Amino acid sequence: MSGFKFNFITDDDGDGDSASDKNLGLGAGAVICEQSKDRDALIELKREGSDGGGDSGAPCIRPAKKLTFNDDLVQAICKNVYQVETLTVCGAEYVHRVTSDEEVASSALRESVTQDSDIIPLVYEGGLKIWECSLDLVEYLASSDVDFAGANVLELGCGAALPGIHALGQGASVVFQDYNAEVLELVTIPNVVNNTPDDDDDRVAALPGRCQFWAGDWGALERKWKELQLRFDVILTSETIYSEAAQPHLYSLIKAVLKPAGAAYVAAKVHYFGVGGGTRQFVHLVEEDGAFNVTTCFATESGLRREILMMRWKTAGAT
Ligand SMILES: C[S@@+](CC[C@H](N)C(=O)[O-])C[C@H]1O[C@@H](n2cnc3c(N)ncnc32)[C@H](O)[C@@H]1O
């Protein structure tokens, strides 16, 4: 199936196939495999075919799964030398693990290589790359008075996870979530470890106590996390509202796990051309439900219009 370009920034230098272009959604044109109207219908069909809990046998929706993250894994990653991109955001340097086509093709994400598509609805949702709104979110958080010290933070749809890594560096405990377990294994976990100063043994040793990694669909995770009574002071998410069909699932999960005095930050494009989602639809969804105040705490017109929305409970006692 041939892809078409949607939203994000197009490939300025034309060739678009260097390792760097493939791993940074910033410079590379994003490709999605379905046209908008077909896409939403396809997503609904896939959802109907699977209850998301992993018991139905349907392979489409990813069940909730907590990945093992222990000291042995941290040590193994510390010893491994990966190819990384270096990014400077707000004066801080971040590294992002570069994946190769071969490596991706040998995982369950092979379709993203064979279809040359950056997003395949409910198969691969784009987490191998860094998308530009995640940098907006890191910049915003670094210049804001959000206090991460001792906070329980959740990054939804984390992919490369720079916002969650920022929160971790400021003293938070962080749950990182991505749709694809393979993204967590190939990119998120190495990024978290590689962005923890390795000359600080205490910080490295403390990682397993301060981080969790969960894969799966937002619907499946909502059921699981309600059972486990996970709750968060701050929820961060970037470039996760491009699909109108998926927005209610993301919203419902935020509503289920945000603490009464907590805040959620949603960084996204105002409009995702070709797929129909964006901040306007999300604000409409939140306002229609009525549980949260939603404000725009950052906006830029440079390139494609982007915003960061902040959500807080209207009633601080709400659950
Ligand atoms: C375009 S990527 C953005 C990655 C990263 N936040 C960034 O800005 O670089 C979208 C992310 O949303 C998540 N996602 C999309 N649909 C999802 C769903 N139905 N359930 C769970 N996660 C989903 C995936 O984890 C994916 O990594």
Image: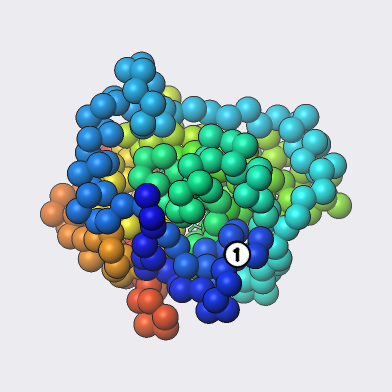
Q: Residue at x 74, y 51 (%)?
A: 194
Q: Is residue 56 visible?
A: yes
Label 1 within 8 A of ligand 1 by Cβ? no
Pick the residue in front: 238 or 181.
181
Q: Residue at x 16, y 50 (%)?
A: 289
Amino acid found under the numbered disc labelled 1: Asp
Foreground: 146 or 295?
295
Question: What colour scheme was applied to this rendering of the protein?
Answer: rainbow
Q: Position of residue 315 (x, y in %)?
A: 23, 49
The residue at which mark 1 appears reads as 17
| Residue density around tag 1, few if under 14, some if 14–19, many if 20 or more, within 10 Å | few
Q: In the image, residue 117 lies at what x, y percent? A: 45, 53
Residue at 29% across, 67% down: 273
> Could you say whether the residue bearing mark 1 is in a helix, strand or loop?
loop
Q: Residue furthest front?
A: 1
Residue 253 placement: quadrant: top left
